[in-house]
Image (cartoon, rainbow, N blue to C red):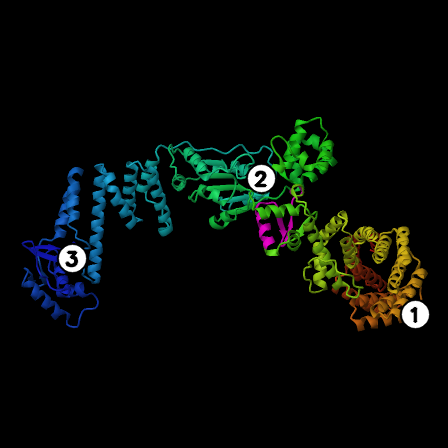
Amino acid sequence: MDFGLLGPVEARAGGRLVDLGHTRQRAVLAALLLDDGRAVTVDRLVDRVWGERPPLRARETLYGYVSKLRGLLPIERHPAGYRLEAATDLHRFRELVRQARTSPPEEAAPLYDQALRLWRGDALAGLDSPWFDATREALHAERRTVELDRNDVALALGHHSALLPELQAQAQEHPLDERLAGQLITALHRAGRTSEALRHYDALRRELADQLGADPGAALKDLHLKLLGPEPAVPRQLPAPQRFFTGRTEELHDLAEPGGTVVITAIGGAGGIGKTALALHWAHLHADDFPDGQLYVNLRGFDPTSDPVPPGNALRAFLEALGVGDPPADLDAQAALYRSLVADKRMLVVLDNARDTAQVTPLLPGGPRCAVLVTSRQQLVGLVSANGAKSVSLNVLDPREARALLTARLGWRRITAEPEVVDALLELCGGLPLALSIVAARALTQPDLPLAALAEELAEQRLDALDDLSSSLRTVFACSLRVLSPDSRALFGLLGLTTAADLSLRSIAALAGLTPPRTRTLLRELEFAHLVQQHVVGRYRMHDLVRLYAAEVAPDDPAALRRFVGYFAATAHAGDRLIEPHRPPVDPPGGEAVPLPDVTAAMDWFDREYESLLAAHRQATAREWHELVWHMAWALTNYHLRRGHAAEDLAVWRAALTAAEALGDKDKQVAAHKFVGMALVDVGGYDQGNHHLRQALDLVTDDYGKAAAHRAVAWALEHQGDLEGALEHANAQLVLFRALDIPVRIAEALNDVGYRAARLGDYEQAERHCREALALNRELGHRDGEAATSDSLGYIAHRHGRAADALEHYHHALAVYRELDNSYEQASVLRHLGDVQAELGDTDAARSSWRQALTLFEAQGRVKDAEEVRGLL
């Protein structure tokens, strides 16, 4: 009788199947057969058949199974249990394998095949218990080893082509089996498919690392090296470093990891900023750290004369440098072979002038010991997010580094011969290394040309002067712009219409006629191309040379510029209404204003946008947009007063006076003459200031305007020391405002009269007027007027000899002015407060007050006041 275990358990007599009963009964038979004629105890049989959950009368049930089997089979009863000695297909399988392993390959092959054909499926199929599961798994592992032995014999006999389909199927079923992988790699190589073999090795290497955190074993590594062929020459592809490389100490430090391992690094920056120079300088400094070689490719992502290098072309060149004579044509196959070749090497790869992340990704090695430097004008965000690259962005050289670069190129003698001219050249180049190199090249090729002549040409025609036969800033910027979306290119051109040093997101949105979110998206694209920089959250600026190019490509779009200026005019108007709500209203200038909730927000907005406001006003003046010119001057007046910007106030009101005269608007002319006159007096131009103030008085026709003009004249006369004249005009102002019954103006006029009376020594009248003014201001909630009146009362108390009262009034005035963010008046009150403190002998407090006042006076350009306080200190 023949017994089968390598599949469903069966018995055959004369070739016919014998009915062995149900599954448990067959399990008892299999448990006996697997012990090869040795006696098996009843308890062990019960454990093998049922495991940890035998039935209640397991022994009696087992006796019943054995009794039925003994009617068919020669099962012997033994003191130690039951035994069955019989031949099985497992015995025949093992004998054939033993013979095969001791035979030469040509004899072993049929023996292995005969042995493996004995398997009819899963061993012990249908039997279910922990013991049978473990035994089945062991038998399958035994079969697996035999299959691998058979594969080795087939490969030795040269049957690799016939074996390949089976090997590939087995590799899919057992992806981490290194012995099988070696057989498949060998078969592929012998079939002329070496690239595919190397790809399979690379895939297995990555799978082992991901699943087990291990590398391939020594045998598989040796096979891999054998397939690679003879060791190629170590590639040394780095171009020569820039001879005059200067500075970049911080960036060079940022390129190295703390442990000394350099990771993939994206070196970003605008065209001409020195990315390639930095990458090559670092690469040459650290070349010895990469003994297996350095690879370099110029990807020409922004080349004006050629298309970007396809990744496949770059990979082919890398593979040839690594000794691959016939690289595969498929990009994925190239990338896999490349990663395999450098997987265990310590190499440096420099990918210069990359267009985008997609161009770079196939060129990245997979080995942890490789380093990659990538330069690009784009911020390669995909490389940073997907590959964990470190981003090192370059800014322009600082003045010291820029001077060092120019000195290295031109020599110390020529630099020191014309120091002021060199300063001008450095400023005109703006720290851009390419611009400095072009200037140096022109100076070297024209040694008789004075640097002063070059500086003059650069000042007049900057971009033209920075063009030479080999480099052109226009071309560099144009190539950066070319890769952007049409909407971003259009926004770049619109930015060229403006002249402000930096711009807020909302002002750019107004310029473009877009929503802020859409504008931010387009600006982000310009940021990634390093054509704009978000140096403060929500504010953007350009390098001077980039701005010049933007101005050259700017469209003729007056409507866009008018939206831009209109935004500033409208928001400044809204802010001024918050700062001085009692001011006579004027018609708003149009345009969309940014919402400002309160005075603090308004002052913050003026502070942030001030330089842009002035630039927008200058552009409105140049375009003769008279209404906007006058409105912006009007809206800036109270901010200028609070910040002490007298010179700037004079400039905008002079332009506003011209605009008012062009409009033929007498009311606007009156206001312009008045504010021009006051600003002139504030900066010491008394004669001209008085002239304009008289013009305002002569032109005004309404009582309110006359009262306001009297107030301005009173203020000017006081500044010139004519206190009697100042008091006369202050009284005229008070009479007119009382007649008009405008409480807030009455309160201000009362204070004006009181202060001038105090200056003339009439303290009784002064205090009476100021007390009335203070009560009225408090009743009206006019905080600015309350602070001014407290300052006046402090002066009166001080002159009356009531120092304690003076301190109280000055401290109150100072607190309110700080609340109102009025730094101009804070300076004046601090000066007065220090005077009282000094008189009381509190010199430390006096010095503190005067020093604070001095800081503010100097910042506001109040030269005379600053000199006086320095003397006091």
- Pick whichever, 653 or 841, lies toward us: 653
Query: Identity of the amino acid at label 2?
Result: Cys
- Give how far apart the Cα atoms at labels 2 and 3 are: 74 Å
Left or right: residue 367 versus residue 791 is: left
In the image, residue 362 lies at what x, y percent? 44, 42
Q: Are marks 3 and 1 in contact (CB under 8 Å)?
A: no
Dot 3 alpha-carbon crowd within 10 angstroms: few under 14, some 14 to 19, many 20 or more: some
For residue 216, above or below residue 844: above
> Which residue is at a point 7% across and 53% down the rendered structure image?
15
Residue 745, located in which quarter of the rendered image? bottom right
In the image, residue 564 lies at what x, y percent? 69, 52
Q: Which residue is mark 3?
A: 8
Q: Which residue is mark 2?
A: 479
- Give how far apart the Cα atoms at labels 2 and 1 are: 75 Å
Q: Which mark is residue 119?
A: none
Q: Which residue is mark 1?
A: 765
Instruction: Give the magenta-colored segment's residue range.
Output: 518-547
- Pick whichever, 252 or 645, lies toward us: 645
